[in-house]
Amino acid sequence: MADKKKDKYCVRCSRKAEDGDKYCVGCGAPLVNSCTNVGDMFTKKCTKVNREDAAYCSGCGAPTIFHREGLLSGTAVRVEHKGEPS
Ligand SMILES: [Zn+2]
Ligand SMILES: [Zn+2]
């Protein structure tokens, strides 16, 4: 094997991603933890790509896409509750 960059795997389904993929082809989860701050009339869109464990953008403080999609196990607050409805 050539000396390649670290393989990338989907954080949701663990499928291996190809170089340059931005979304998982298996489940559609984002593979790049980019900022969700798309800006508005007064602020510029934030295009920062954060670490994979970042819940909030280190550049502007907005939630990251992993956080918004509930892909961060440690921070997915509402996803864990799967109790039966009473
Ligand atoms: Zn996936
Ligand atoms: Zn940002």
Image (cartoon, helix red, strand yellow):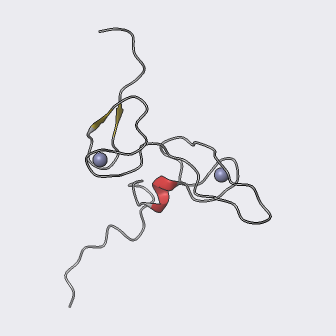
**Nearer to the camera, 38 or 61:** 38
Residue sticking out furthest to the front? 41
Q: Position of residue 28 (x, y in %)?
A: 33, 52
With 6 as the anchor, is 68 left or right in this view?
right
With 79 as the anchor, is 22 left or right in this view?
right
Q: Residue at 57% across / 43% down in the picture?
A: 50
Q: Where is residue 11 in the image (x, y as percent from the top left)?
A: 35, 45
Compared to residue 85, the image places residue 57 above or below, namely above
With 52 as the anchor, is 59 left or right in this view?
right
Q: Where is residue 49 in the image (x, y as percent from the top left)?
A: 58, 42
Q: Looking at the figure, which quarter contains the N terminus?
A: top left
Q: Count of labels shown?
A: 0
Q: Residue at 76% across / 66% down in the picture?
A: 41
Residue sticking out furthest to the top? 2
Q: Residue at 59% across / 52% down in the picture?
A: 35
Residue sticking out furthest to the right? 42
**Nearer to the camera, 54 or 34:** 34
Q: Looking at the figure, which quarter contains the C terminus?
A: bottom left
Q: Where is residue 46 in the image (x, y as percent from the top left)?
A: 67, 51
Compared to residue 25, the image places residue 6 above or below, namely above
Q: Residue at 55% across / 54% down in the picture?
A: 64
Quadrant in the picture for residue 48: top right
